[in-house]
Image (spheres, helix red, strand yellow):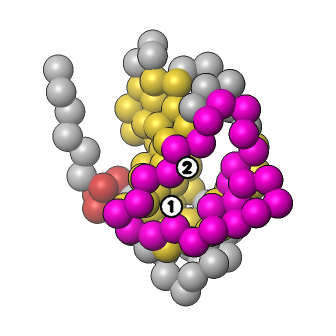
Amino acid sequence: MAEVFEVAKLKKFNDEKRHHEIIWSDEHAKVSLLCLKPGQEVITHTHHGSHIWTVIEGKGELLCGKKSQPIGVGQIVVVPALEDHGIRNSSSDNLVIASITGQGD
């Protein structure tokens, strides 16, 4: 059955570190919500499958290898399998991202 999620009700922030919460999963994929206050980040990492981030609120920096580029609301980031990637909230506002990955990553 299809599900609809209210981001405004699900988003949570932590003063000490970014908040990461799985909001849906099955045997094929999972959807997480990442909430970052200014200055917080997801350190660079890799996955065995592709990784998709959708920026829902705020803006920040996409980190790929040693490069960075700005990202913001309305943008979708697609990271191929095994590529280093991370994100940093370099703004003065909160950043909320929906993260989609295949199971096992």
Picture quadrant where residue 105 is located: top right
Tell me which residue sits at (52%, 44%) in the image: 78
Tell me which residue sits at (41%, 18%) in the image: 26
Res 22 visible:
no
Q: Nearer the viewer, residue 33 or 13?
A: 33
Q: Is residue 34 above or below residue 36?
A: above
Picture quadrant where residue 90 is located: bottom right
Q: Is residue 31 above or below residue 33?
A: above
Q: Nearer the viewer, residue 55 or 66?
A: 66
Q: Marks 1/2: CA distance? A: 7 Å
Tell me which residue sits at (35%, 63%) in the image: 74
Residue flagged by tag 2: what amino acid is it?
Answer: His
* Callout 2: SS: strand
Residue 56 rendering spot, x and y as whole percentages: 37, 61
Tell me which residue sits at (68%, 25%) in the image: 48
Q: Are marks 1 and 2 in contact (CB under 8 Å)?
A: yes
Q: Nearer the viewer, residue 39 or 46?
A: 46
The residue where tag 2 is placed is: 20
User: Does the magenta-highlighted stretch encompass residue 72?
Assistant: yes
* Callout 1: SS: strand
Residue 16 rendering spot, x and y as whole percentages: 68, 68
Span colored in magenta? 62-86
User: Does the magenta-highlighted stretch encompass residue 11?
Assistant: no
Residue flagged by tag 1: what amino acid is it?
Answer: Cys
Residue 61 rendering spot, x and y as whole percentages: 62, 69
Tell me the chief SS of the magenta region.
Answer: strand
The residue where tag 1 is placed is: 35
Give the mark nearest the N terminus, 1 or 2: 2
